[in-house]
């Protein structure tokens, strides 16, 4: 029994809407290629890939063969340059070391020469003093006999010490050995007052003994009271308590 036409049309319309609406089932489109053509296509692709691989391999071998030779040549050239630079460096280093050694030797010689100059200057000054001494000694050989103070020097070492140097001579013919002692009198100003100190002190009297025939040098350092200003130093040559000679040096 056939359905009425209106019902059939309604079913067709419903199916058509379901196929073309959003809720319609998904469609898959496949390209149906026969397997013989597919096999031929795969064989062509594999052949082309193999040909490209062989070409790349041969090109790489050629490049490595020719490029490797050039690299080896460049490496040998660079190695020669390195060796040459090392030789030049060693030569320059040897030159610098030699120059530095000569400079150090010159510095050492300069220091040594400066020391020799200072030593010779001191010896020259001493010889001059000896010459002055003998010049002053010769005239008294034929003069009056007795002890004389030929030269006296006094200088401040620092604020609390004064150094003295004295040259004693004895002239005349057939001179005898002189035995005695000497005293020093230091005059100074301290706290705006004049004062004086006599040396030696009792405990150091032995250091002020004199014993000579023709000449004798005496020297020493005197202690200056703190804050004192030394004005003069006087020396007295004594024999058995009697003054045989005296001299004063002002500062």
Image (spheres, grey):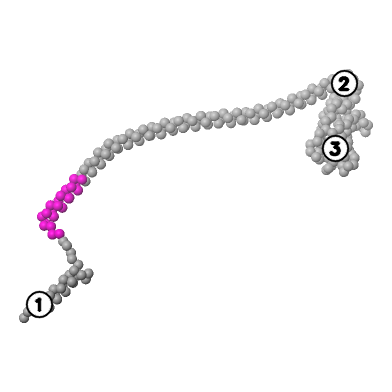
- Secondary structure category for the residue under label 2: helix
For the residues labelled 2 and 3, the Cα–Cα distance comes to: 33 Å
Pick the residue in front: 22 or 29: 22
Please check the rendered image and state whether residue 49 is part of the magenta-colored stretch, yes or no.
yes
Which residues fall within the magenta stretch? 31-52
- Residue 24, image x, y percentages: 19, 70
Q: Which residue is mark 1?
A: 5
Q: Please name whichever residue, 4 or 167, is drawn nearer the observer in this view of the structure.
A: 4
Give the distance between the C-alpha atoms of the residues marked 1 and 2, in whole angstroms. Answer: 180 Å
Quadrant for residue 197, please give it.
Answer: top right
Q: Residue 185 bears which disc, if any?
A: none
- Spot occupied by residue 92 in the image (x, y as percentages of width and height): 49, 30
- Disc 1 secondary structure class: helix
- Residue identified by numbered label 3: 230
Mark 2 or 3, closer to the camera: 3
Lower position in the chain sequence, tag 1 or tag 2: 1
| Residue 99 image point, x, y percent | 54, 29
Is label 3 or label 1 in front? 1
| Circle on res. 140 | 2
């Amino acid at each position: 029994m056939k359905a009425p036409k209106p019902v059939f049309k309604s079913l067709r319309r419903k199916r058509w809407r379901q196929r073309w609406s959003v809720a319609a089932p998904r469609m898959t489109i496949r390209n149906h290629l026969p397997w013989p053509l597919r096999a031929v296509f795969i064989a062509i692709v594999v052949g082309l890939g193999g040909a490209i691989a062989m070409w790349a391999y041969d090109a790489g071998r050629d490049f490595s063969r020719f490029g490797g030779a050039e690299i080896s040549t460049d490496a040998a050239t660079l190695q020669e340059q390195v060796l040459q630079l090392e030789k030049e460096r060693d030569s320059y280093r040897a030159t610098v070391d030699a120059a530095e050694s000569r400079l150090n030797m010159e510095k050492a010689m300069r220091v040594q020469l400066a020391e020799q100059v200072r030593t010779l200057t001191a010896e020259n000054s001493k010889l001059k003093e000896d010459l002055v001494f003998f010049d002053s000694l010769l005239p008294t050989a034929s003069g009056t006999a007795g002890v004389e103070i030929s030269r006296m020097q006094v200088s401040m070492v620092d604020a609390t010490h004064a150094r003295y140097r004295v040259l004693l001579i004895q002239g005349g013919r057939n001179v005898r050995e002189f035995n005695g002692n000497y005293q020093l009198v230091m005059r100074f100003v301290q706290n705006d007052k004049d004062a004086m100190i006599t040396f030696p002190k009792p405990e150091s009297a032995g250091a002020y003994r004199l014993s000579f025939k023709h000449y004798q040098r005496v020297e020493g350092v005197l202690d200056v009271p703190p804050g004192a200003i030394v004005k003069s130093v006087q020396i007295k040559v004594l024999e058995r308590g009697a003054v045989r000679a005296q001299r004063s040096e002002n500062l």
